[in-house]
Amino acid sequence: MANLVVFYSRKGTTRNIAEMIINKENWDFEEIIDTKKRSGFIGFLKSGKDATLKKLAKIKEIQKDPELYDLIIMGTPIWNKRMTPAIRTYITEKKSKIKQVAFFCTEGGSGGLRSFESMAQLCEKTPISTLEITKKDIKNGDHTDKVTKFIQEIKMEKK
Ligand SMILES: Cc1cc2nc3c(=O)[nH]c(=O)nc-3n(C[C@H](O)[C@H](O)[C@H](O)COP(=O)(O)O)c2cc1C
């Protein structure tokens, strides 16, 4: 069975990392669309607040059935040291259909590890691999090797 890359991105950074993974391996993907207006400064403030309060989001209808995949690779930006409401909603709605997970995130510099722990708790599954990409990683070009290592680990650990 195949792998599915599921991600949310507000500004495109997480989408870029997701695309690197998807293009390298030709894995299927699902981009989660949060219908709330999150652009601009007000959008930024609302987003941080929603993440802190662990709010769920109104997301567009999911197209791909996670039950048809043996691994879901989930990607989120970090907001106020937490997963985004869009990813929280996806996990909450779909967790009974998810068999194995791997996580990746993009962030300014901190909060990824803590968020991976909450994501694992919410999924009720330990990730087979995780990838945390900081702004500095992208600036230095370190993200490419990190993505390659993440994919290798997924292939090794996947049952
Ligand atoms: C509301 C909000 C809160 C954020 N909180 C954090 C944070 O706690 N830690 C961090 O390192 N970066 C934080 N960031 C930065 C984003 O995680 C980072 O820019 C990420 O790469 C954005 O991904 P995207 O371009 O896919 O939306 C925050 C960004 C936003 C919009």
Image (cartoon, rainbow, N blue to C red):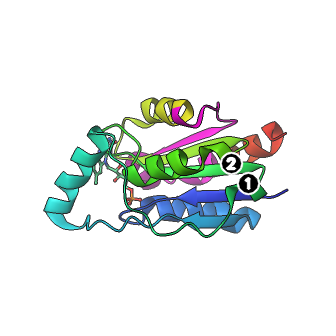
Task: Locate residue 5: give its quadrant.
Answer: bottom right
Q: Nearer the viewer, residue 93 or 142?
A: 93
- Give coordinates of residue 87: x percent, y percent: 47, 51
Q: Nearer the viewer, residue 63 or 154?
A: 63
Residue 146: within the magenta? Answer: yes
Mark 1 lies on residue: 67
Whether ligand 1 has any atom under 8 Å from the Cβ at mark 1 is answered as no
- Residue sitting at x 58%, y 37%: 123
Please provide the residue range marked out in magenta: 122-148
Question: Marks 1 and 2: in contact by CB < 8 Å?
Answer: yes
Dot 1 amino acid type:
Glu
Residue 31: within the magenta? Answer: no
Judge from the rendering whether residue 103 lies leftward or rightward of residue 68; answer left or right: left
Judge from the rendering whether residue 129 lies leftward or rightward of residue 159; answer left or right: left
Mark 2 lies on residue: 97
Q: Quadrant of the N terminus?
A: bottom right
- Residue sitting at x 72%, y 41%: 100
Secondary structure at badge 2 equals helix
Work out whether 102 lies above or below 58.
Answer: above
Work out whether 59 lies above or below 110.
Answer: below
- Give coordinates of residue 103: x percent, y percent: 58, 43
Secondary structure at badge 1 equals helix
